Image (cartoon, coloured by chain):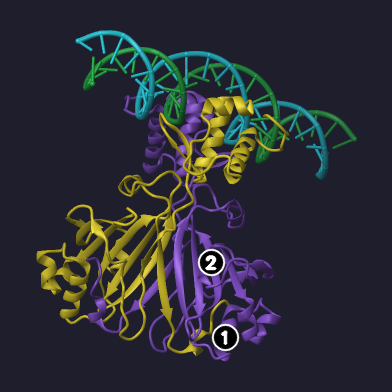
Chain colours: A purple, B yellow, C green, D cyan
DNA sequence: GGTGGCAGCTCGTAAGGACGAGTGACGTCA
DNA sequence: TGACGTCACTCGTCCTTACGAGCTGCCACC
């Protein structure tokens, strides 16, 4: 390789040199890197070595490769869209999601069954009948996409009349219907970071090396019985979740980090 | 390739065949895949093709490659450790974290400055002086690791005497000290999913293709001024966060998903 | 019997050649 | 003038060959 010999595998040295070039502004965001052939000449290495280096930078999310065009430096990661998942106490506004989403299609409504993942959350066995409602939500400002899924057990749908007829009602209407049916709602939500599945990669238009942030929210009724399950999946590059937490009695802070 | 010709690149066909073998139980979790040489014979392809297929499976997190030993099918992802980030209303218990963590080392205490990320969260400019306290927490049951970082602005440390002397106090002691200093605490927390940086990969002992789940929690005082910033980073494979949400007035559910 | 070294397995890195496929610009032909 | 085909450029896939490095078990030597 041209210049000073550094330790480690050659392709790592090439990757480090390109990384440095990006950091120092030699390759500004949005511009194409030198082509593979040029990198071969420049660093005096073989094509596999160059491609290996490029693969490393790709998996770090630093660059993006477009067939027939070249390798492009990615812009600084856009400040991710914040999705409010918040509640404040006593009468203040209660946001379950960023407001101005647009729906890409009409909601997809289908019948499905509980799985080994969703069953326990709904306190049902496996194979119990559910309504499924899938939505693709888009933030008009940034184009960020969200996959939203609603799973409604038949028993819940029957207990709240509007649901059985039209499960593709807006979320707040569903909450309203459940409240009207006499339920006092609480929610519990788990958040995971994981790599996308193939269908998520295409639906969310995820580039390489992009994790998804995945939440499962269970709405509980008065006796804490699970009523519905909401799933939200978004690109880790485009979305972050935000929670606001209020404590009633500060004395309750014991028993943390023993 | 042996057998029926399927469409698409050869290495994808090989990857698909191995994927199928894993799904069908031919290669159970924990067992080694056939070696590269054997896969070459079996599918009648060259070594780069086999390695390309293996790289694809690796980046999906399906297998794990150990130098000198072989490629191993990963076990089903262990049910991740749930970290409670919860609050319930009015007097009930308030858990800021899973309780029985062990510390790997003594906390590392150092002086640092706000960055373009942490400054705005603490409502400070860039380059303002901070105490930093880093901890590596381990769940004794599963071995799951957590990186915990506490950033304390000097002004906060001065306003609560114990902090200036010993910033490496346990978290609940810090909250207690802040409360004793007259603050009525609230918290806001953001959650992101992203790929690890090199230092996180080693500190959390992350395998390939493992995202991290990263939370930033700001503790606010009586006038909502930011007091301290807590960062928590964990493997997406090992940890999930859990929130419990309670609403005071169900009428406040309007203005969701317009 | 114990211990060290070597052999033979694994994957990691590297070179070099060949061809296919996507893209865009240019020039030619109608 | 307009449309289409060609060509030059990009990256994608695939092959062969070679050697280095981590790991393990066998075997010979002490």
Which residue sits at x=55%, y=40%?
A: B27
Residue A169 x, y percent position in the rendering: 64, 79
Query: In this rendering, would D25 be left or right of A132?
Result: left
Question: From where the camera sits, is residue B111 visible?
Answer: yes
Residue B153 sits in which quadrant? bottom left
Task: Classify mark 2: helix, strand or loop.
Answer: strand
Q: Nearer the viewer, residue B163 or B76?
A: B76
Residue linked to disc 1:
A178
Total marks in image? 2
Vertical position of residue B111 compared to residue A162: above or below: above
Residue C29 x, y percent position in the rendering: 86, 30
Comparing labels 2 and 1, the label whose residue is closer to the camera:
1
| Separation of residues labelled 2 and 1 (CA atoms) | 20 Å
Q: Are marks 2 and 1 on the same chain?
A: yes
Residue A38 x, y percent position in the rendering: 50, 28
Given the image, what chain letter belongs to the residue carrying mark 2? A
Vertical position of residue B162 compared to residue B33: above or below: below
Identify the mark at residue B172; answer none if there is no mark: none
Question: From where the camera sits, is residue A1 visible?
Answer: no
Label 2 packing within 10 angstroms: few (<14), some (14-19), many (20+): some
Identify the mark at residue A232; answer none if there is no mark: 2
- Quadrant placement of the C terminus of chain A: bottom left
Residue A43 sits in which quadrant? top left
Query: In this rendering, would B110 be left or right of A149?
Result: left
Query: In this rendering, would D27 be left or right of A80?
Result: left
Q: Nearer the viewer, residue A70 or A151?
A: A151
Residue A54 x, y percent position in the rendering: 48, 36
Vertical position of residue B165 compared to residue B15: above or below: below
Label 1 packing within 10 angstroms: few (<14), some (14-19), many (20+): many
Task: Classify mark 1: helix, strand or loop.
Answer: helix
């Amino acid at each position: 390789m041209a210049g000073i010999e550094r330790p480690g595998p050659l392709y790592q040295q090439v990757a480090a040199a390109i990384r440095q070039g990006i950091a120092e502004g030699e390759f500004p965001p949005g511009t194409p890197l030198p082509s593979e052939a040029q990198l071969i000449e420049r660093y005096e290495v073989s094509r596999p070595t160059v491609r290996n280096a490029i693969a490393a930078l790709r998996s770090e999310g630093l660059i993006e490769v477009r067939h027939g065009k070249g390798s492009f430096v990615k812009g600084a990661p856009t400040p991710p869209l914040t999705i409010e998942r918040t509640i404040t106490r006593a009468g203040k506004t209660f946001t379950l999601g960023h407001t101005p989403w647009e729906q890409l299609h009409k909601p997809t409504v289908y019948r499905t069954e509980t799985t080994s993942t969703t069953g326990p959350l709904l306190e049902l066995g496996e194979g119990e009948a559910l309504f499924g409602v899938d939505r693709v939500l888009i933030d008009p400002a940034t184009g960020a996409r969200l996959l939203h899924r609603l799973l409604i057990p038949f028993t819940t749908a029957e207990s709240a009349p509007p649901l059985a007829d039209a499960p593709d009602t807006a979320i707040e209407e569903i909450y309203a219907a459940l409240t009207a049916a006499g339920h006092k709602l609480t929610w519990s939500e788990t958040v995971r970071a994981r790599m996308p599945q193939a269908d998520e990669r295409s639906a969310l238009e995820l580039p390489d090396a992009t994790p998804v942030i995945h939440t499962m929210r269970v709405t509980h009724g008065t006796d804490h019985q699970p009523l519905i399950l909401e799933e939200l999946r978004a690109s880790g590059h485009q979305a972050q979740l935000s929670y606001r937490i209020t404590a009633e009695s500060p004395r309750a802070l014991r028993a943390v980090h023993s």
